[in-house]
Image (spheres, rainbow, N blue to C red):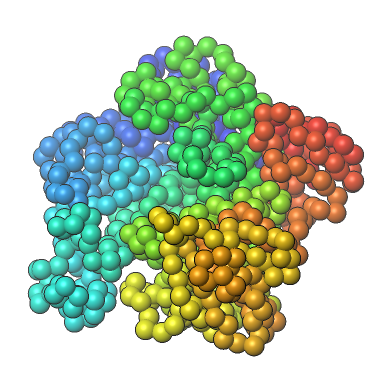
């Protein structure tokens, strides 16, 4: 039985590092946390050299005092296992634990995540420190849960030590059993790559053309990294389950080359995420039209929700962020920290911990500011956090356990994500189309989920949704196509984009007309296709029932040929040598329908399809919202909460035709209402 994220109250807290501060400061820090409404703190995830200052010598006195004092002050404690930062004595004595780059350069001690997951001695030492910690704190009344490691696969998510090559070889032997099957899966007959002995098989290594490994080998590499990471985390999870059975287990992340769904199902009570919306302001495409900026962080939160319908935010941005030499983010404006906190809650968080209590004065993160500044004096971020604490304390248990309501899901899968990292013929398109669909739905105030298709996905999971948008699934197994067909036959509406269905699970192309495994679903074939770049200028699409509506056909064009008499052409290309050819089709199949859009989605094209499907906001009957306000709905057995978040600095005008009460203030709201800049309402 998995333990819930929260059960007595919404949990609000902060990350705290007692080893960074004089012990004389702890009591005052804890007192102020409680006064601000905080209930929980995280500590210990980087403290291996404190817990084990030399091999086999363990000392817990400092953390015993820190945890005991927190407990006496009414604060719950989450302990992190410290395996993301192996200490110097360990990496010096056992250099085989260090990670190695693709080029063969050993990464040295001095930062974090300098280890690999495959080294037998590293796994042994990680198991030992986890066992020691679980023995010390597994029954401590102040410790409520554990975070395994910290941000698995962050900083670096590829591994090329000797231990990794050995582990990859063993993984392949279990997967394929024989070299004959491996050679077949990897297509090694191409360029005389065939293997005659297992000792010849490695992870991808440098080739004459840089970063150009066998693509089928590269896909298996990502699958191996995920399985290997999960097996590393399982060592710790098993110890914690045995020695701390009454405390929950999670880990924080959402990083590359890791099937977080599988990991959570196998090992965790729930998933945790680190939410830094300001990244959307510093890592963004300047050429993107009409960007959502920090509001786009909801797309990542939707992906987290697909792993855990209710989740923990283990690190919530609370100030300007940055390391000494990178990620120099601006300071949140007044109200933004509160807005971002409720963004996390609106998307399903039942626990939020700010990063961090006080800005570090040492190390790489001296510019990753916490709630308190260096001077430790009151500031506006402290006041804003206290306001959030007061509001959530007043809410109590009313929100926890309620879940997001959505009738449309954007569909993803790990195989296409991992294959698309290398394959430029479909990989970049998935991320663009995901973002464009999310933007469109956000501005139309239609909540959506992210749904990951996996080997164990059931028809019941699909039929929760009226519409599924699966933009560019190049890899599609026949079994996946069959499951999707069952969804459509029962009345579901399925939307594909270009580059659909033409690869098998090994990333090899089918010897059948595109869209391959999805051909019968769509009722069309792809007559021809082209990249749109360089001298090949973009064309546009005329929508059939409204010829005056023209949208651009971005990045790639599939020229379609209708095969079935159940297919209706919804749009045609407007120019180039394929002018007049089908660009968008709809196939009526069973009780449902399948759309094929022959390009990469943009906001305008997504809006056209939404309009054709007749989708509208679930609050359209009683609420008028401007595009700059986000809508999310959390619902339980006997309650329904409508979250409204204003991402503009200026007030937004909304209109309610029914009376509603704001959960945060208790005020009745009806008619015209001005929602302040960066403001939040939770209506019921």
Tell me which residue sits at (28%, 66%) in the image: 215
Residue at the spot 42% in from the left edge and 71% down from the top edge: 475
Residue at 19% over, 82% down: 180
Say which of 400 and 355 sits in front. 355
Camera sees residue 174: no
643 or 308: nearer the eye?
643
- Is residue 113 at all visible to an observer of this figure? yes
Residue 273: x percent and y percent? Answer: 48, 45
Q: Where is residue 459 in the image (x, y as percent from the top left)?
A: 58, 76
Query: Is 231 drawn above or below residue 281 in the view shown?
Result: below
**What residue lies at 19% left-to-right and 35% top-to-bottom?**
109
Q: Is residue 671 above or below residue 634?
A: above
Q: In which quarter of the image is the C terminus?
A: top right
User: Which image quadrant is residue 23 in?
Assistant: top left
How many numbered circles are shown? 0
Where on the picture, by quarter, is residue 368? top left
Q: In this view, does 287 lie to the left or right of 621?
A: left
Please, is residue 250 above or below residue 15 in the view? below
Q: Position of residue 183 (x, y in %)?
A: 20, 77
In the rendered view, does 510 fall on the left or right side of 435? left
> Is 475 positioned to the left or the right of 677 in the image?
left
Where is residue 271? Give x, y as percent.
49, 51
């Amino acid at each position: 039985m998995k333990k819930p994220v929260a059960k007595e109250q919404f949990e609000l807290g902060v990350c705290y590092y007692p080893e960074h501060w004089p012990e004389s400061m702890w009591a005052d820090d804890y007192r102020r946390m409680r006064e601000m409404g905080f209930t929980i703190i995280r500590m210990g995830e980087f403290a291996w050299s404190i817990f084990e200052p030399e091999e086999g010598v363990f000392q817990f006195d400092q953390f015993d005092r820190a945890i005991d004092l927190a407990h006496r002050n009414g604060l719950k404690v989450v302990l992190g296992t410290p395996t993301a930062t192996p200490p110097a004595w360990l990496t010096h004595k056992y250099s085989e634990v260090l990670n190695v780059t693709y080029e063969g350069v050993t990464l040295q001690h001095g930062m974090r995540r300098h280890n690999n997951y495959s080294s037998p001695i590293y796994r042994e030492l990680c198991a030992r420190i986890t066992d020691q910690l679980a023995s010390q704190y597994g029954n401590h009344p102040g410790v409520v849960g554990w975070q395994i490691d910290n941000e698995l696969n962050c900083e670096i998510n590829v591994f090329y030590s000797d231990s990794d090559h050995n582990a990859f070889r063993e993984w392949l032997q279990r997967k394929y059993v024989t070299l004959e099957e491996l050679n077949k899966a990897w297509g090694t007959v191409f360029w005389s790559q065939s293997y005659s002995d297992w000792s010849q098989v490695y992870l991808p290594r440098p080739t004459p053309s840089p970063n150009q490994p066998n693509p089928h080998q590269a896909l298996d590499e990502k699958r191996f990294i995920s399985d290997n990471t999960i097996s590393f985390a399982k060592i710790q999870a098993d110890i914690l389950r045995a020695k701390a059975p009454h405390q929950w287990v999670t880990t924080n992340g959402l990083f590359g080359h890791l099937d977080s769904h599988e990991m959570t199902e196998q090992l965790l009570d729930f998933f945790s995420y680190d939410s830094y919306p300001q990244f959307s302001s510093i890592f963004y495409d300047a050429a993107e039209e009409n960007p959502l900026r920090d509001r786009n962080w909801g797309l990542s939160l939707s992906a987290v929700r697909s792993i855990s319908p209710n989740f923990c935010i283990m690190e919530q941005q609370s100030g300007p962020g940055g390391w000494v030499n990178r990620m120099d983010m601006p300071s949140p404006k007044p109200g933004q920290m509160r807005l971002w906190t409720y963004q996390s809650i609106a998307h399903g968080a039942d626990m939020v911990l700010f990063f961090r209590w006080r800005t570090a004065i040492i190390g790489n993160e001296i510019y990753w500011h916490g709630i308190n500044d260096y001077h430790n004096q009151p500031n506006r971020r402290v006041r804003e956090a206290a306001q959030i604490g007061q509001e959530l304390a007043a809410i109590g248990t009313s929100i926890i356990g309620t879940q997001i309501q959505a009738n449309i899901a954007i569909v993803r899968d790990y195989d296409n994500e991992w294959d698309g990292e290398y394959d430029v013929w479909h990989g970049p398109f998935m991320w663009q189309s995901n973002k464009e669909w999310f933007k469109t739905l956000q501005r139309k105030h239609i909540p959506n989920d992210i749904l990951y298709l996996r080997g164990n996905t059931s028809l019941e999971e699909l039929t929760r949704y009226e519409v599924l948008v699966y933009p560019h699934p190049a890899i599609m197994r026949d079994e996946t196509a069959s499951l999707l067909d069952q969804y459509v036959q029962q009345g579901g509406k399925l939307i594909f984009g270009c580059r659909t269905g033409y690869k098998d699970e090994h990333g090899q192309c089918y010897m059948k007309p595109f869209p391959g495994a999805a051909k019968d679903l769509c009722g069309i074939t792809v007559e021809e296709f082209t990249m749109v770049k360089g001298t090949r200028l973009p064309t546009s699409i005329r929508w059939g029932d409204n010829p005056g509506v023209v949208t651009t056909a971005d990045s790639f064009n599939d020229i379609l040929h209708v095969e079935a008499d159940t297919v209706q052409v919804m749009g045609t290309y407007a120019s180039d040598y394929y002018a007049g050819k089908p660009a968008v089709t709809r196939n009526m199949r069973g009780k449902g329908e399948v759309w094929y859009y022959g390009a990469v989605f943009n906001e305008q094209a997504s809006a056209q399809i939404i309009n054709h499907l007749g989708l509208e906001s679930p609050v359209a009957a009683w609420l008028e919202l401007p595009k700059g306000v986000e809508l999310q709905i959390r619902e339980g057995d006997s309650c329904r909460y409508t979250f409204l978040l204003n991402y503009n600095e200026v007030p937004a005008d909304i209109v309610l035709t029914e009376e509603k009460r704001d959960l945060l203030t208790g005020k009745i709201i009806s008619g015209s209402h001005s929602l302040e800049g960066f403001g939040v309402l939770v209506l019921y």
